[in-house]
Image (tube, rainbow, N blue to C red):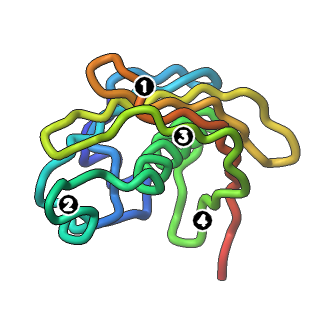
């Protein structure tokens, strides 16, 4: 549904922190399913861990937040500009259940749980080959900056 060119127009993130490669399903005001191809070239693998590369949990959560932001933009019917930033405002119930390694394809799924006062709450899950790697409730909001 959204390729990397469209994602680059929507998200302000760039290498090395852009963590969504493709959106494969998107239902505005409902849910999103996106992909992150995990490669050995990711810069965090140099130190996490050199003898056994493992994707950091915080990076998996950031990938889910970026997918969730794309869902928010589609739901609002808007695109961000250089003065718009999406911020995390909360993470609840994060549980890590599977190691993610180079060569894995991380499937990012997020569904809007509720929207109140400009804060979006999502139920999010990342998996590899059908096995849950992480799940959490995420809260984000969009703000204009000077």
Above-or-below relation of 50 to 73? below
Q: Identify the image quadrant of residue 111.
A: top right
Above-or-below relation of 51 to 108? below
Q: Report how far apart the C-alphas of labels 4 and 3 lie in the structure.
A: 15 Å
Crowd around label 4: few <14 · some 14–19 · many ≥20 (10 Å):
some
Q: Report how far apart the C-alphas of labels 1 and 3 lie in the structure.
A: 17 Å
Q: Choose between 78 and 136: the one closer to the eye.
A: 136
Helix, strand or loop at mark 3: helix
Q: Mark 4 or mark 3: which comes first in sequence?
A: 3
Please give the name of the residue rendered at 60% of the width and 65% of the height, measured from the top-left corner.
84
* Label number found at residue 84: 4
**Furthest-bottom residue in view?**
146
Which residue carries the number 1 mark? 132
User: Quadrant of the image for the N terminus?
Assistant: top left
Above-or-below relation of 31 to 11? above
* Label number found at residue 68: 3
Q: How many marks?
A: 4
Q: Report how far apart the C-alphas of labels 1 and 4 lie in the structure.
A: 32 Å
Crowd around label 3: few <14 · some 14–19 · many ≥20 (10 Å):
many
């Amino acid at each position: 549904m959204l390729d990397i060119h469209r994602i680059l127009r929507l998200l302000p993130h760039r290498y090395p922190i852009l963590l969504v490669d493709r959106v494969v399903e998107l239902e505005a005001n409902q849910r999103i399913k996106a992909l992150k191809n995990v490669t050995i070239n990711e810069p965090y693998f140099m130190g996490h861990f050199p003898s056994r590369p493992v994707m950091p949990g915080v990076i998996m959560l950031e990938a889910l937040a970026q997918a969730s932001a794309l869902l928010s933009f589609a739901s609002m019917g808007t695109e961000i500009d250089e003065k718009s930033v999406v911020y995390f405002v909360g993470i609840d119930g994060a549980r890590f259940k599977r190691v993610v390694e180079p060569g894995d394809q991380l499937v990012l799924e997020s569904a809007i749980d509720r929207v109140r006062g400009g804060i979006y709450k999502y139920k999010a899950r990342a998996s590899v080959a059908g096995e849950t790697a992480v799940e959490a409730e995420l809260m984000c909001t969009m703000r204009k900056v000077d």
